[in-house]
Amino acid sequence: MLRKIYIATLALGMVAASAVAQEKQLTAESKKGGIVLTSADKDYQVSLNGRIYMDGVHYFDDKTDLSSDASVEDIRLGTTIKWKQWSAKVNVSFGNNEVKIKDAFLRYNQAKNSIFTVGNFFEPFGIEASASSKNLRFIGGANTTQAMGIGRSIGLGYTYYTDKFYGSTGLFAGSVDNHNKGDQGFSTTTKLVYTPIVNDKVLFQLGGSFTYRMPEANGFNESLNDDDYNREVLLAAGPEHKFLNADIKGARTDMRYNFQSMVLSGPVMLQAEYTKTKVTRDDDYVSRLMKDNPYWTHTATGGYAWPTKPEDYPGWYGEMRDIETEAFYVTAGFLLGDNYSYNSSTAYINRPKAGSYEFLLRYDNTDLNDIDGTYFNGSYGPADLDAALGGAGNMSIQGGKAETISAAVNYYLNDNVMFRLNYSYMDVQNQVYPLDEKVGMIKARVQVNF
Amino acid sequence: MKKINVRNLLAGALILSSIGFAGCEDDTPDYNPLNLYKTYPLNELSAEAKIVRDYVKPDAVIAHRGSTFWAPEETEAAFRWARNMGADYLEIDLQRTSDGVLLALHDGNLRRTSNIESIFPGKEDYPVSVFTLTQLRKLDAGAWFNVAVPENARNSFIGQKICTLEEVLKISEGYRIKRDVSGEPVKDMTRLTDGGEWAGFYEFEIDPQDNGNRPGVYAETKEPYLFPKMEADLATFLSEEGWNVTDSPKTIPTTAGKVDVANTMGRFILQSFSRQSIVSLEKELPGVPKCMLLWEDESASYVRPSNSIESLAEFINFSVEYNCHIAGPSIEGKPNKYPDLTEPWMCEMYHRAGMIVHAYSFDTEDQLRKYNGDYFYGGVSRFEDANRSVQGNFEYDVNPNMFIDGGFTNLTDLSMKYQGRELVGTAQEVLNSLGY
């Protein structure tokens, strides 16, 4: 299906381009990174866009084996059409032999800096999570972003920006990855960025984002009379998502806060983000009790009964309390051959000019643990050891914790090609992988985009 | 547009392909127990705990429920048979009556091993803790065996009673229940209830068929929620009976050349699957040998098959923390078809923590040979040749730490024969001599 959508849209773009060409009024213009075909009356513009990420990764694994490999991580093909104040974009990924819709939206520019968007596009959240991977400083986002960033969703958004202010908000109804098992979730996400200092020498930016979400359901369970069956929030990052992986089941709502800051001064860049996630959880204990029926057995003291009321479930298995996780990173960059420049329409950095080298260092601290119980043999019990030994449960989430130091070199060969080389060293703590402590990885990417 | 620099492209491709080649290198041994069992971090029993561990008789033959094959389990007949056969330990499952008497019974109710349907209809699934000892004495705990194991049926098993812990200790000391001319147990009317009624206890007498063996007792406690504070009751009872080795244990006369475990510091061993009970046992009976029983299942209470080495290590470390001197893993094989927690690498880990291994439960010679490692030694048992050597090139370190130190057996006779011990007769002959 995705292939058909993509092919139809691509064909539309080609037909539009061809129609313009047939009237012999076509002008072809080379813009940064690609060719744009424009009609004579300037009302229509068509561009084809795409990218190729050729990656290699080698893990210096500790005890758990990780799959070092070379891969074509992403192949992207797409078309953008603009006419008057409207534009539409379709972008489909074929990386790793999977077809996925990426950008697919219609956009209306009420004014140059006042934009409405409908379709599948980035929710405005933080710096890295709402930026295209081709513009990230490292190969992929920080663990903070991988774990708690959001990405694209289907929805309606509005963006307004000036030199000093950027605001974007939207209402979304889940992602295109929805498996149609149970009701889709929804979210509302807003990002506000203020840049009090913008001049030739220094730029200083502060911002915050907030999202309120209802996660997607994973199916129906008629016996529990529960349309919200097993809504789930998965926070995962790092190598093969092994050492940082929090699977929060029974989720009801998911709120995330992000604070961002950026400083640009000539060839120097500092960028930082802090993200906190709070997931509320619940279970349908009434239906469970109706299904189980109160249980009574005989003992010398007259018998004991369990369960007799809905509260008995959280009393024994552990309360489905709220789960909070947090993470942050700080990145420092230095450009050789160019200065950093700011793009107020994206509230992010422009691509450095061809021939530039970029050197980067990043510290990331991602903590996906929310533990208030005692751990033994793959499960949590209450903090009270005797109760834990007696088999009572606890609903702590152990997603792992990691401090990661990364270094990177980027070489911008031209407007279409860049080379990236990253090294990361993770100090991991995860009770599921008790023997793994230090994991190193070196990654390289040849990145082509047009 | 700037021209693509071919040299730079080539350099990039070279970096990528070298990473690809590096990725092919096998830099880390596979994460599996067979690569990690020797180095997986484990805690080790303290020197003091090892002294207690060494109370336990080496190469222990532990008579599982007395016998499950030759006589009705956990009855006087089974325990007398095991004693006279020559078992080192009489194994029992501890439960407690509603009037606080500790007794030996495996199941959570009396349906399988008694005629409760006839005596207390409608209460077949009630736990022992609902009944008084006097009520339980009305049950026949032997007749069921003649139906379940007809090839070993004996009329004299009919009327066997559920055994109290006191009776098990007395049998170990060379006593038996006193019976009248009609064969009925003689009630001990010196021990009465608060209401002045018989409390369910019998009189004892020196067993005329006792052949001098003095086995120890190896008692399993259940989940504490079933019998709250039973560990404290057990400690009190053992002290009263002179069986608590940390509290003025009594001298139990022994005979040279016979089993003498009941008169050693290893006379009573505690065992449990329940970690909660283990913690209580360590509190109530410190300095008494303890065994952490192990079962495999995908649950926090058992060794998880999905991550066996981590899970096993957690149980071992827990055992060390609470001074469990013995690991009690299950073995595979017919007829039980239990999961195998006694693989060589697992035994190596138990031993590395300073524990000894008492596996459960043995029914065949093949199991005895397998878990004693004979098949690595050309079929030679260590009881035949203490200096046996590995036969064949297994390309890994085969060593005595990979095998067991004793086992729970349903066939004491078979285990003794395997160890080359002198048998006083066949199982049937021993039962005959005991009057069954």
Image (cartoon, coloured by chain):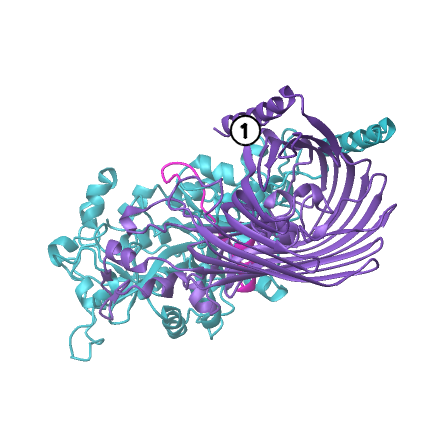
Residue A269 figure quarter: bottom right
In the image, residue A132 above or below residue A208: above
- Look at the numbered disc 1 and give the secondary structure of its residue: helix
x, y percent for residue A20:
62, 25
Nearest the eye: B159 or B231: B231
x, y percent for residue B327:
51, 53
Q: Is residue B262 magenta?
A: no
Q: Which residues are magenta?
A: B312-337
- In the displayed structure image, the side of residue A123 where residue A345 appears, left or right: right
Q: Is residue B324 magenta?
A: yes
Residue B365 figure quarter: top left
Residue at (83%, 57%) from the top-left corner?
Answer: A200
In the image, residue A104 above or below residue B121: above
Nearest the eye: A391 or B113: A391
Residue occupied by mark 1: A9
In the image, residue B54 above or below residue B391: below
Q: Colour of chain A?
A: purple
Nearest the eye: B25 or A273: A273
x, y percent for residue B273:
42, 56
Q: Is residue B246 visible?
A: yes
In the image, residue B120 above or below residue B68: below
Furthest toward the front, the residue is A41
10 Å crowding of disc 1: few (<14), some (14-19), many (20+)? some
- In the displayed structure image, the side of residue A343 where residue B151 appears, left or right: left
- In the displayed structure image, the side of residue A96 where residue A247 appears, left or right: left
- In the displayed structure image, the side of residue A352 where residue A377 appears, left or right: left
x, y percent for residue A56:
72, 35
Q: Colour of chain B?
A: cyan
Q: Is residue B383 visible?
A: no
Give the quarter of the figure containing the N terminus of chain B.
top right
- The amino acid beneath tag 1 is Thr
